[in-house]
Amino acid sequence: MARAAGHRRRSERRRFLKELARLAAVAGLAGLGLAGHGRAVQARPAQALRPPGALPERAFLGACLRCGLCVRACPYDTLRLATATGPVAPGTPYFIAREVPCEMCEDIPCVAACPSGALDPGLRDIDKARMGVAVLVDQESCLNWRGLRCDVCYRVCPLIDEAITLEPQHNRRTGRHAIFAPTVHADRCTGCGKCEHACVLEEAAIKVLPERLARGRLGRHYRLGWEEKAKAGGPLVPGLIDLPDRVPGGMP
Amino acid sequence: MRRMPGRAAAERRGWLAAHKWLLARRASQAAVFGLFLLGPLAGVWILRGNLSSSVVLGTVPLTDPFLLLQTLLAGHAPELTALAGGALVLAFYLLLGGRVYCAWVCPLNPVTDLAAWLRQRLGLGGGGGRLDPRLRWALLAAALGGAALTGTALWELVNPVSIVQRGIIFFLAPAAWVALAVFLFDLLVVPRGWCGRLCPAGAFWGVVGQAAVLRVTAPHRERCDRCMDCYAACPEPQVIRPALEGPGAPLVASGMCTNCGRCIDVCPQDVFRFGTRFHGKTMTAGLPGGREETT
Ligand code: SF4
Ligand code: SF4
Ligand code: SF4
Ligand code: SF4
Ligand code: SF4
């Protein structure tokens, strides 16, 4: 009798352990599948911009509660919550600049409404927001680059003459006019998307892109000679003789 | 004709008395979503946000503790607002039973209830051995472990509970497909499959409810004539047996009980009451038409 009971207990334990192993395997598989899916969503489409103050994407996906309080707080209906089937992580807030740009509210109501800190409450000055960087992606269709005076992107910019300037240069087509090239300065551009929204072309020639797509980066080892020279207050190699530059033959 | 749980009780005590908790729950679910929808539809902002996190009357924050736990495990230190909101909600459910969320708030509950009811109506049979109810613990572990390992709220990418509640409040149409998938899964694949076997949120709330004060009690269990209606109506039937058959107190002690009150409604012998975990004291329904009759 006692032996039979012991046997039963043992086989019960064995069954339980087997169940446990199976459940652990299921948990692991489910986790893996989810993690793969998570990776895919992290590659958010370039046109989907996060609200001002959003943490870097990965941290944002760990912090955002998907509550939509930022969406409700936005007075311009800029923000919306991602649907379950779209390419943006479901329930997270984003905006499409070409449809409704961010109006750069001075009191930043979206950030004030965020309960989680996924929108950094440390962002007090909307000019410091970095939702993306505007890039004039297509000089060939930009009207200003064709020598016309459209200037619309420049004029709508809340940080006109800081985030975007018009840089005059020679118009080689006419030979005697200027091209006023819209030029974005990434250190001031907030990525609000007003320029992209306002661009008069059928498809905007200026677009706000996430920083990772919009910007290049010098190698860390790179030094610009003239800057180093200015920093050092003189030539870096003392007593360097400045030889005349070699010029093609025949030139003075 | 199959025996439908609740019919015998309705014959004995009247339709209303045999559905009072069910009606109260549907009213509660409708009220929660109604209050959220008053904002976008009528500009009356009593509840702003959604079930994941919200603000009551522009002042009191509420946050889903399960979601908060995921963000904590993901390594994010939430702002005080979210933490306070989480503590408030947790305190509420610690008192009333974690899975009160399931029965009284969750938008998928009417969906899975409808599937279960239809199954009974159509005589699709019980079955249900096909998925181990402990699977939800595995999914809960995957959701929490996944958050910790990836630093993102991984489960929220697919969580049908939050997708559907958000879809209702923010008018996001694809949520309907998710609700339909859950419905069909429960109707055709595994009975009570989603809420009873898989949903990690339900599992989480089950843990919270383990210590809850509000309990279903069976003060008149000696009257039970084993009609089995309560088992047939209960979304977690395994929790009833100890209360009915002992040896312990006549109390549904499991945290997996959703405090839906269906067992109270459908029992023709009027065995069950809401009470507390301490003495299984009875308490009156306090609803119109829900007067208790002592037989
Ligand atoms: S800054 Fe203003 S316009 Fe821009 S997203 Fe926030 S609330 Fe909306
Ligand atoms: S308010 Fe914050 S937590 Fe809520 S959806 Fe917006 S970013 Fe996410
Ligand atoms: S996105 Fe365009 S409009 Fe907005 S700050 Fe940058 S350059 Fe200006
Ligand atoms: S088990 Fe999950 S889906 Fe079902 S009612 Fe509870 S939270 Fe909602
Ligand atoms: S025991 Fe009763 S109250 Fe609890 S889940 Fe089952 S039917 Fe609902």
Image (tube, rainbow, N blue to C red):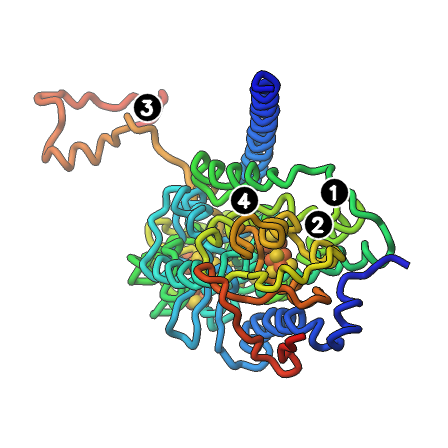
Tell me: B25 left or right of B147.
right
> Which residue is the site of mark 3?
A247
Whether discs 1 and 3 lie on one chain: the answer is: no
Tell me the number on the disc at residue B192: 2
Choose the circle earlier in sequence order: 4 or 2. 4
Q: Is there one chain holding both mark 2 and mark 1?
A: yes
- Residue type at tag 3: Val
Mark 2 near mark 1, Cβ–Cβ under 8 Å? yes
Viewport quadrant of the C terminus of chain A: top left
**Residue A250 spot, x, y in % from top left:** 35, 23
- Circle nearer the viewer, 2 or 3: 2
The residue nearer to you, when weighing A214 against B43, is B43
Q: Nearer the viewer, mark 1 or mark 4?
A: 1
Q: CA distance from mark 1 to mark 4?
A: 25 Å
- What amino acid type should be assigned to the residue bearing mark 4? Trp
Share a chain, discs 4 and 3?
no
| N-term-proximal mark, 2 vs 1 | 1
Q: Nearer the viewer, residue A240 or A175?
A: A240
| Quarter of the image where ligand 4 sits | bottom right
Above or below — where is B287 with respect to A237? Answer: below
